[in-house]
Image (tube, rainbow, N blue to C red):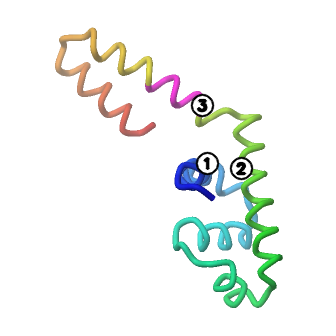
Amino acid sequence: MTLDETIYISELYNIYGELLTAKQSEILENYIFDNLSLGEIAQIFNISRQAVLDSINKSVSLLNKYETILKIKSNNLKVAEVLKEVKNNVTDEKLINKINNLLETL
């Protein structure tokens, strides 16, 4: 998995991670966030490396499916673009601060 793919999957996980099972979440967290190898994860869960890989692939597939259907990440990006454009055309400091706060939450 490339760095860009890892970042993208971690962003999807932050949005949709609670929709995965507890075991899928733990395995994916160990792989993505803790940077553990398939072998290390296999030892932790007492399963084969292939089972770890299958779980990761299924979890990634599910996260992508959720994004395809719900589009939360892509919609957040669109909203952020519009907010940045509005911010560049506004002079009221209070409004600029509110826009900045919104951008931080996206």
Task: Give the SS element for disc 1.
Answer: helix
Which label sits on residue 102?
none
Residue found 60% across the figure and 31% down from its top: 74
State the image quarter where residue 99 is shown.
Answer: top left
Residue found 68% across the figure and 84% down from its top: 39
Residue found 81% across the figure and 84% down from its top: 48
Left/right placement of residue 69 relative to residue 81 reads right
User: Where does the image place residue 26, in percent across and percent down from the top left?
Assistant: 65, 72
Q: CA gap, disc 3 to disc 2?
A: 13 Å
In this figure, which residue is indicated by the disc labeled 3? 74
Task: Give the SS element for disc 3.
Answer: helix
Viewer-side residue, 36 vs 12: 36
> In which quadrant is the C terminus drawn?
top left
State the image quarter where residue 66 is shown.
Answer: top right
Does residue 77 show up magenta in the picture? yes
- The amino acid pointed to by label 2 is Leu
Q: Residues within 10 Å of mark 2 (few under 14, many from 20)?
A: many
- The amino acid pointed to by label 1 is Leu
In this figure, which residue is indicated by the disc labeled 2? 63
- The amino acid pointed to by label 3 is Ser
User: Where does the image place residue 89, in percent across and percent down from the top left?
Assistant: 27, 9
Magenta residues (range): 74-80
Does residue 75 show up magenta in the picture? yes
Q: Residues within 10 Å of mark 3 (few under 14, many from 20)?
A: few
In this figure, which residue is indicated by the disc labeled 1? 12
Task: Give the SS element for disc 2.
Answer: helix
User: Where does the image place residue 32, in percent across and percent down from the top left?
Assistant: 58, 65
Left/right placement of residue 92 relative to residue 6 reads left
